[in-house]
Image (cartoon, helix red, strand yellow):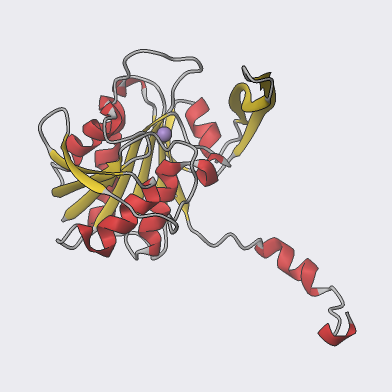
Amino acid sequence: MHILVTNDDSITSPGLLALVQEMRRLGEVSVLAPDRNWSGSGHVKTLDRALRVREVRLADGTVAYASDGAPSDCVALATLGYIKQKIDLVVSGINYGANLGHDVTYSGTVTAAMEAVIAGLPAVAVSLELPEGHTGEVDFTPAARVASWVVKQVIDNGLPPEVLLNVNVPFLPLEKIRGFRITRLGLRVYHSRLDERIDPRGRPYYWIGGDAPGGVPERGTDVGALAEGYVSITPLHLDLTAYHALTDLMTWNLPDIQDL
Ligand code: MN
């Protein structure tokens, strides 16, 4: 079992190191991750510039590779041949902060796993919930133990084709986590606000600011599971078709294109 580990918080993140150390108990591990923070970068394919990769060492001495590409670029690089030995599984994380509901389209952590699905590989994205305004050290040990169990299930049982798992871990000590819940995506509530400021030359510039996002803690959703102290495991696929809208659209009287 050859596991590729990546993330979006950069190769220096303690969350990546904690994940690498746990994954090593399950198989051989290769690490290819971004050389800077790509949080919130979404699903990226870099086409207009060259990508660079350099060998680095993680804090425990592990040989790893850092790229100036996005998390999804890192997965593409690795699976397209930068890593010579065939990769069996991709694990992304452990992210600083939960990736719930609509977050999944913003998340570099989750979109790295999406890139793995495109490469035909099973993938797991792992994120650790952080309380609003949390600063200082973060203990990734509980989330790494959770990731290890989930990835072991994927190794033993496989995943349906084209499916990735989005795993979110509550910010609790292992003994306080209440268990696992299989969930669907919930509803994030964003509080984004445009913050306009003036630069020293009198020109306006902008920050997308505002308070941290909340969510609707509905039973059965990832948001609901975390709110109750459970790990959420949400299966995702890349088919964004709104199937419920198809029948409605089928009633449209579609004109002959020549009549436009
Ligand atoms: Mn991140």
Q: Residue furthest front?
A: 201
What residue lies at 49% left-to-right and 15% top-to-bottom? 133
Nearer the observer, 14 or 260: 260
Q: Position of residue 102 (x, y in %)?
A: 58, 42
Q: Is residue 237 left or right of residue 244?
A: left
Q: Residue furthest left?
A: 61
Whether residue 25 is visible: yes
Q: Which picture quadrant has residue 22?
A: top left
31 w.r.t. 47: above or below: above
Q: Residue furthest right?
A: 259
Nearer the observer, 94 or 6: 6
Count the marks: how many? 0
Q: Which picture quadrant has residue 233?
A: top left
Q: Position of residue 110 (x, y in %)?
A: 43, 45
Q: Which picture quadrant has residue 182?
A: top left
Q: Quadrant of ligand 1?
A: top left
What residue lies at 54% left-to-right and 39% top-to-bottom? 103
Q: Position of residue 131 (x, y in %)?
A: 47, 18
Nearer the observer, 149 or 75: 75
Q: Position of residue 53 (x, y in %)?
A: 24, 48
What residue lies at 44% left-to-right and 28% top-to-bottom? 97
Whether residue 157 is visible: no
Nearer the observer, 77 or 149: 77
The N terminus: image quadrant? bottom left
The C terminus: image quadrant? bottom right
